[in-house]
Amino acid sequence: MSFTDALNHAGAKPAGKRPYFLEPQVERVLAITMAVAQELAVARQRADTLERLLLEKGVLSEGEIDAFTPDRAASAERQMWNQEYIARILRVVQQENEAAMLAEDVASGDVGDELASEA
């Protein structure tokens, strides 16, 4: 997957304007925080599993992970992952910027309000 493909995939969104249930600024911070929390929880569980398996099988000794220094290729892969990660976390900001450029998008809440006012 190319970097551009990864960023496009990370920023995928449903059609229409984003509905808000709280203040937009609060929802933005909440969405970013929850994205970070989700990513961290998954990463922590996977790292814990790997460390336990490797220690149990005698592949690693205590402290080896903390002492590890990545080579150039590993550093480049980590940098790519970090950029994709930040794109996923800040997805809500990207989507809001895109939505601002497409003023004709309609939020489902706006449609509901309009239909209710016609009744």
Image: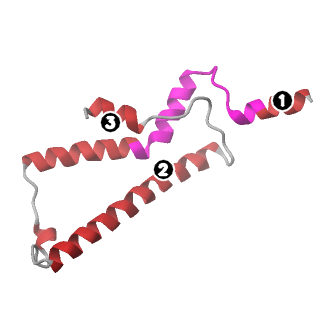
Relative to 105, residue 43 above or below: below
Q: Is residue 98 left or right of residue 43?
A: right
- For label 1, the SS is helix
Query: Which quadrant of the figure has residue 49?
Result: bottom left
Q: Residue at x 82, y 28 (%)?
A: 114
Q: Main secondary structure of the magenta part?
A: helix
Could you tell me how far apart the alpha carbons at marks 1 and 3 are, in whole angstroms?
38 Å
Determine which residue is flagged by label 1.
115
User: How many neighbours does mark 1 have within 10 angstroms: few (below 14), some (14-19), or many (20 or more)?
Assistant: few
Q: Position of residue 113 (x, y in %)?
A: 81, 33
Q: Which residue is mark 3?
A: 6
x and y percent of residue 99 in the render?
Answer: 56, 28
> Which residue: 86% across, 33% down?
116
Residue 109 lies within the magenta run: yes
Q: Earlier in the sequence, mark 2 or mark 3?
A: 3
Q: Say whether residue 1 is left or right of residue 64.
A: right
Q: Quick one: label 2 or label 1, which is nearer the N terminus?
A: 2
Report the amino acid beneath label 3. Ala
Which residue is rendered at x = 35% and y = 34% of the image? 7
Residue that carries the numbered disc 2 in the rendered image: 32
Please provide percent x and percent y for residue 80: 24, 42
Q: CA distance from mark 2 to mark 3?
A: 18 Å
Residue extent of the magenta highlight: 88-111
* Quadrant (top left/top right/bottom left/bottom right) for the C terminus: top right
